[in-house]
Image (cartoon, rainbow, N blue to C red):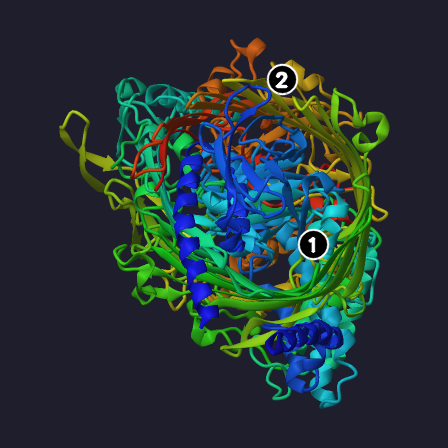
Amino acid sequence: MRIKTILTGVLFAGLSGMLFSCKKTLDEKPYGFYSENQILQTADDARNLLLGAYNPLSNDYNMLRLPYWIAVDLDNDHITGPSWLFGNTGSGDYVDFWGMNNIWLGHYEIIGRCNEVLAKVPPLNIDPVVKNNILGEARALRAWAYFSLVRMYGAVPIKTKTLETDASSSAPRAPISDVYSFIIQDLVQADTLLLPKDDPKGGGPGRINKAAAQTLLAKVYLTMASGAQKGATLTVRGGKDNGYYTYTQNGVAGYEGFNVDSCFTQARNITAAIIDGSGGGGQFSLVPNFKDVFTKAQIDGPEAIWYLEFKDGTSTVNPLNMYYSPTSVKRGYGGWAWLTDNFYNSYDSGDDRIVTGVYHQFYSDISNPAMPFLYPQRDSATYAYSAPVTYPDGTVKSVQAKVLHRAFIKKYSDVTSPDLENSDATIYMFRFADVLLMFAEAENEVNGPTAAAYQALNQVRERSHASDAPAGMSKDDFRSFVFEERDRELAQECNRRFDLIRRGVYLQVMNQIGVDQENILKSRQEKHLLYPLPQSELDANSQITQNNPGW
Amino acid sequence: MPVLWAGENQTRSCNTRLVFYSLIISISMLKSKRLLCHCLFIVSLLLCTGPVFAQGRVIKGKIIDAGTGLPLNGVTVMAKATKAATTTDANGNFQLTVAGNSGILVFSYVGYENLEVPVGAKTFISLAMASSAKKLSDVVVVGYGSVRKSDVTGALASVKGDELMKTNPVNLQQGLQGRVAGVQVLQNDGAPGAGISIQIRGANSFLGGTEPLYVVDGIPFNADNSSATPNSLEPNEVQTINALSFLNPSDIESVEVLKDASATAIYGSRGANGVVLITTKKGKRGKDKIEVNAVNTLSQVTHQIHVLNAETYANYENEAFINADIYAGTNYQATGQLPYTGTVDPVTGIYKPAPSEFRNKSTNWQDVVFRKAISTDLNLSFSGGNENGTHMLSFDYLNQEGTMVNSGYKRGIVRMNLTRHVKSWLTIGTNTSMTRSFNNQLKTGSTDLFGQAGVIRSALTYAPVYGLNDLKIRRLTDPYTYTKDVQNNIGSNSLFSSNYLEITLARGLKIRQNVGLSFLTNQRNQYYPVTTFEGSNAHGEAEVSDNSSYSVVSETILSYDRKIGKHDFSFMGASTYENTLYDYKAMGASNFENDLLTSYNLSAGSVYAAPVNGRTQYTLNSFLGRLNYNYDDKYLATVSYRADGSSKFAADNKWAGFPSFALAWKVNKEDFLSHSHSISDLKLRFSYGQTGNQAIPPYASLSKYTPVPFIFNSDLYNGYAVAQPGNNGLKWETTAQFNLGVDLSIRNIFSFTIDLYRKRTSDLLQNVILPGSTGYASQLQNLGSVENRGVEISANANILNNAFRWRATATFALNRNKILSLGGKQRQFGANITLNDAPFIQQVGSPIGLLYGYVENGFYNSEAEVQADPQYAGSPENVIKKMVGEIRYKDLDKVPGITDADRTVIGNVNPKFTYGFTNNFSYNNFDLSIFIMGSYGNDIVNLNTYYMSNLGFPDYGNITQALYDGRWTPQNAAHAVNPKAIATTDRSFKFSRRFIENGSYIRLKNVNLGYELPVHDSKYVNSLRFFVSADNLLTITKYTGFDPDVNGYGQDPSLRGVDLGGYPVARSFNLGVKCIF
């Protein structure tokens, strides 16, 4: 019976023992994630919180790693490709593109994380210069996201607090003008907080610096000004015959209240200060050879203002090389977005941007698997190709293949592993050539086609050995020339669609084409000027009851 | 030493008696399964000592059934005073030595009224015993104890092992399908080893937590299929494995399904979805026996879906391209770019055959992937026991071939169940099983739109113009490659051990310690070769992923039973502790030189995916008590309370209490009914209680800062970001349930159980979809409430009870679900089920599982009809032209244009009712059972149709004949059910009834014919039974997919009834033998 007593005692002890230990028992022991009090002490912690805000830009499938440029860059008059890729965003069917929800979320993820930085970094006891730079980066990054949103969706909710401190998850759409005021306010503050590009206390290569915030601000003003500018004419080359078509700018809905002159002047002054270095953001210049601009060697060169880096062997990689460069023989596929013939023919024949800046792929599909041939010259279409084809009855005939000429931009081809799907192509967010062209555009609007305007424009053209812009152009002609030059320089850098829309000619230019050379539908309607808000936002946000018109 | 001598003598005399009585048992077992009774008898016998038998006289007798007049085999005959006992043989005869003339003989037999007969001077007693329906199954297991069935106060249903095994289920849930009213068993699909979900009395949660709690021999077990399924390389693959696969159905003695709150509240925080108590088989006292069961099964898919042959397909493709020219302004025909021309393609130089060249040269991809499958299930068990304890050792081997090539499921289980009475006051026991299973999966149930469609959709849509070894188009993996080249297997090991120690402190007072351990690991090996679409981009893609969970349960239970006069009390109090540690990891590689090494050497790849791993841990700590009170066997009351503490909730909300009570009144025991001949049993039950639900992942209340990468200055830095917004108010989901039940038995022939219930669940745990503008997709919140009301009826009838016996059992369940509140919102939507469609709407006043979408109104038959539609007024010519032959949607909001505001409720995946109907016949040595079950009034979202309906969409491939025949053409406009075929990528459909079908079905689920060989005199075999059975013999349904019993999203209650291209359910024929030695 002694054993019985002992055993019973043990069991009762166990029974009651749990009563006393239960409080601690139920504490959760976290594995694999941080809690807030473990982090947010040091300058590195502050930086890491900021890097968390940058993260969506180049990671996951919300922003520039993938869907962003499929939405923005496949939807313009100068690009084409296979119907499977161009079937939705490339054909105006935004709703059916898987990435649309992701893009909306991606922008607000950045905004939410910037809000987190702006709320949690100020109390930290760290070097105030470093701290200010971090806060400046957060403000400029948040402004970038809002600027991108307002151009894509028009009126959008403005969020300035984190979810934890802002219990109401629903927020109404702020009018376009309010969004722009908010962006300008953020950027003006960022300009004062940020350090120049090479400052040792700054963020370092690939991060937002003072000049980046200024460039963004200039772009904001330029967009406001051109969107508000109605009635000006713009001649754009295109249509089915690559003719010159003159359109009248329609203006952009919601931009009516902006002061065209003062906005252009702001844009002019800011870009002028970046160009001459008086803005305090550092000295910038063009990389001498166009073909070097997008190489790894030059990525942090004198032309780079802000860019996104990727790295092989990490999860931060992108498929830009696969989509935009020709088919890799080893990979066996890829090369899905190329320049339209019309756009290609709008360059001077000796322009580096289509000589050294473009891969010429000749597609001859006779042999299996289909492989591309690359030639150095634009007239390589004369290379004929024939091959034996076996017919079902067993006879073999030599068949002359029709050779397709496709021009692929080289901008994303300097990657470590060109045969992989995903590699480390760098993406410029802002580069100096854009600043020069913005200056030329704004200077022309403010002061007419002055020598300074010509000088900025020709600086870009001369670098690529293109002929100088025709002298003595009218203000309208100069506007049109710069407009076209912007895409010749910035093709497939997420620029053209925004340019077409801010100048109010997107619908006119696209509808002039109708269906393009690859049977891609280019015609658009009024509703295409703004993307539809994701249905999930409408469903979950009680303050938004209406989608954009037509969606 | 006299004591020793006496002991030896006892042992010897026991041994001889053992032999004798074992013989009786073995004979009796030939016809009877009522072993328990015999064992009890043997126990009582063996407890007696020799001298009792020394002096006395022999009484003989014969016992027959009062109703049928047939002899009763196995009736226990016991001398009341001396406890000497025996049982009747096959002819109903018995012989017992009694002391003197005084005394009483007690005759007892399971299912019959006890009889007491004074011995007097009789030497032969002839008796007829009357059956009593109420004692058919005497004891049922309830949480932390058991009660006599007649004393049950709550709503519970009991299924015995042999009933469960009728359909030769491979897992527990299959065996339960259709057997219990109010229990809805939904298989993900028909794949061997695939996940199954059970829902009891409707969905009362939006999250994955509507699965009942499983308790195996007293030890709770979380059957979460998703967390048991290792990470898949393919994120669109939603198929899960069955977390309960370690349980061999043939090892199950009985299953009790607790449905109302009185029964489940004792499980507190996990009782809200009902509790399934599983009791495994134990050895029985008596002669050791060896049992062998073998079942062979031949299975095949019930039917194929009629898709186009190659010639028709080629014509259809040409038509799509010609229509693109006509309606969309392309110029394919003029430039010779139709797909099937009989000419050389001017661009590629490749010869393109004409449609007629495919005549009689079509590949039927369904033939390629489906097969006749043979499965084997072998069971061997050794069991027995004596007064010191029982033992059972069982082995099970299952080799189940899938009806699709290269799919299958193998499983081996070893189980040991031991009990031992160590001291007169101490009993210990263990039920320990080890399981190894290996699941060769095929990718079915894919949510992907294009190439990664999964094998079923590929078998339907892959173009019949290609042969098995043709160069494949890369946009879709062909079904042959899917089955031949893809590696996708999951190996699982599990150890489940439930152990106890029980001390009897005093009469009626016991303390028991349960210790449960479970250790489960699952490892998945996947490889998609370069020949598949999945693997072509990555040049071969491999992943090895695993998970393991380790949980320990400790329960200390104190129980006390006491009867004072007419007052019968029993009290139980316990404290429990549970801790579960879950780990997972995955590593992957791609870009392989060749496909030879598959996933067995990841370093053969040259690109490595970032490793993924994680660990979670949670603890549950509880205190509980229950008091049962029974007055005069007429009035019963049960009160229980459980205090549960869970680590998963916010700091201030970790503890919650769950009370319940139940009252029952045995009306037939009242004087006014006690002599009624028609009503043999009548019990009224009422219960109320609260239960909880904590089926959320750990750490859900905390803001999780996780490392996220960003690259600058050529280096990778890990920044911090909040991956999951915390919620410091997170707490339990609470369900309050009323239940009113009646048990009625008429003349012991008909018996009914009817339950009415209403349960309301508040503080629903849900991943509330946040506006994207918050920067987060969703947040776990307690929001809203939902109600389930319903009726459950089960009825039994002993229709014929003579040599030809006919018993029928029917179950019927009806549940109405209603969302009462969504926390201020009027509606919200479930997750997307296609790229853009989230048709599951949750709105206040409607059930979970409502489908929302657009209403169609025929087609635009001409340009004039398009122009007449206000939304196309003034549209350009090309837009108008393109709309001809397209679906016209109803403009419900009368505002021109078809927008989200034009959606309405278009379907409901909840059945109006479900039912099951079993007939058991027996005649001599034959028995036959026929089981019919069905579901009425539920809708199914058929995503196969969804992916095929966009006729002519490049890369979608083949379509069904029905879609083709119903396509819009100018000639067929009046009879069109589908829009025109057109080769364009920019057409998309709105979600309408087109993709929803009536999922009602009635199914002849099982027919089982058995024959018990008369082996009475055999020295070698005690029992030999053969059976043939057929499963899923006949299904009547309007559903056009493979099978209406499909539920692609498994345990997710918010997305029920979606056919994602599931593995078809098979029709199978079984041949089995059961032999006892």
Residue under numbered circle 1: B270
Binning the other alpha carbons within 10 Å of mark 1 as few (below 14), some (14 to 19) or many (20 upward) gives many
Where disc 1 sits, the SS reads helix
Q: What's under tag 1, amino acid-wise?
A: Arg
| In-image side of A208 versus A365 (left or right) | right
Relative to A500, say whether B748 is above or below.
above
Picture quarter with the C terminus of chain B: top left
Q: Position of residue A138 (x, y in %)?
A: 71, 73
- A186 left or right of B324 in image: right
Looking at numbered disc 2 in the image, what kind of residue is underneath it?
Tyr
The picture quadrant where one finds residue B989 is top right
Viewer-proximal residue among A519 and A46: A46
Q: Is residue A371 above or below residue B511?
A: above
Q: Position of residue B1051 (x, y in %)?
A: 60, 45
Residue B420 in view (yes/no)? yes
Q: Residue at x 52, y 20 (%)?
A: B805
Q: Is residue B610 above or below residue A237?
A: below
Q: Is residue B228 left or right of residue B266?
A: left
CB contact under 8 Å: marks 2 and 1? no
Q: Secondary structure at mark 2?
A: loop
Chain holding disc 1: B
Q: Which of the chains bears the disc numbered 2?
A: B
Image depth: mark 2 or mark 1 in front: 1
Real-space CA distance between mark 2 and mark 1, rounded to the nearest whole angstrom: 54 Å
Give how far across and how far down residue A263 sits, in percent. 78, 62
Q: Which residue is mark 2?
A: B860
Near-viewer residue (A196 or B84): B84
Q: Residue at x 67, y 59 (%)?
A: A107
**Between B102 and B920, which is closer to the camera in this rendering?**
B102
User: Is there one chain holding both mark 2 and mark 1?
Assistant: yes
